[in-house]
Amino acid sequence: MRPTARTLLSLVLLTGCAAEPAAPVDLAAPSQDRRRQMEAAIGDCMKQKGFKYNPDTAPSGQKTNEETRREAGDYAALRKHREKYGFGIYAGYAYPGDKQAGGVDFGKQDPNNPIMMALSRVQLESWRATRDTCYSAAVKKFTGKTVRSEFDLYEQAEAAREQVQARELDGDVRLLDLAAEFGDCLKTKGVKVRSLKPTAVASANETALREEMYALGEKQRTDRGVNLPDRIRTLAEEQGDTGSTGHLMPSLSPGEARPYLAREVKIALDDLECGRDFYAAFKPRQRQIHDRVNREFGRGDGLAS
């Protein structure tokens, strides 16, 4: 999934110095241990360059049993979630305090926020640039990957994931048969299915709804003038990291979002009924690929969450 404007804002605010050699990462070690090593390397590098840095070693959230079941393609778990949250597109607006809604967890504060807030604009730009260099050195040390920034690592990991999925999922004969049945069912419900490849069919409805949401954001920008999403895009341009992620998110109150969510829920449930057999076979394979690529790029280990 592409980052939302809120995620993009977090990335550009945190966007450096070769780090001192660190102990090799034990890939069999718990993720939290690797995270500490990576953040410590970034912190040492920043300190050598004269900058303060607070390593972010907050524990990652553990998956619930329901989340694990959904990722395994369990029909009952998927239906229960979609009945309230749909695909998780408008749910974050309708339920702003609900983490399950798929929105940003504002309860988790970056430990470097106080440091950044105390810097002037020039100092902050220098801090970001230095962190990017330190971050890149840590990624190289712990994963062997060459990246310019956290955003660059995200983009590379997503591209790798899409390549693996195209090879392993879109080339699977059984999944192709199930995707064809799924796609035919969606067409009877008026859904425009652009491709019968498994990865395309799996995201057909969600992609269409997200495009509608981005169009709504663009319309609001035109109607209201410059707003927060425009500032987010400007910050991204300053960092040189726009690409296809510079979508404008609409501004919606919970009340305004509920009609959009109600429609989304209906579409998500129809989608699930059409894809019940497909998801049971597709989702476990997709989860395995995500985990494999994330581990390769150090995502979730402190280099990118």
Image (tube, helix red, strand yellow):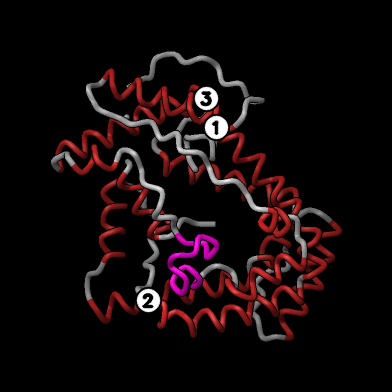
Q: Is residue 140 above or below residue 7?
A: above
Q: Amino acid at mark 2?
A: Leu
Q: Which residue is mark 3?
A: 142
SS type, badge 2: loop
Q: Nearer the viewer, mark 1 or mark 2?
A: 1
Labelled disc at residue 252: 2
- Real-space CA distance between mark 1 and mark 2, rounded to the nearest whole angstrom: 36 Å
Q: Amino acid at mark 1?
A: Gln
Labelled disc at residue 297: none
- The percent coordinates of residue 106 (x first, y second) are 39, 55
Residue at position x 34%, y 39% in the image: 111
Residue at position x 59%, y 40% in the image: 294
Q: Is residue 23 above or below residue 171?
A: above
Q: Earlier in the sequence, mark 1 or mark 2?
A: 1
- Residue 106 falls within the magenta-colored stretch: no
The answer to which quarter of the image holds residue 48 is top left
Q: Residues within 10 Å of mark 3 (few under 14, many from 20)?
A: many
Residue at position x 69%, y 52% in the image: 166
Q: Earlier in the sequence, mark 3 or mark 2?
A: 3
Number of marks drawn: 3
- The percent coordinates of residue 179 (x first, y second) are 78, 67
Q: Earlier in the sequence, mark 1 or mark 3?
A: 1
Q: Nearer the viewer, residue 193 or 95?
A: 95
- The percent coordinates of residue 117 (x first, y second) are 20, 44
- Real-space CA distance between mark 3 and mark 2, rounded to the nearest whole angstrom: 41 Å
Q: Which residue is mark 1?
A: 32
SS type, badge 3: helix
Magenta stretch in the rendered image: 90-103
Q: Residues within 10 Å of mark 1 (few under 14, many from 20)?
A: some
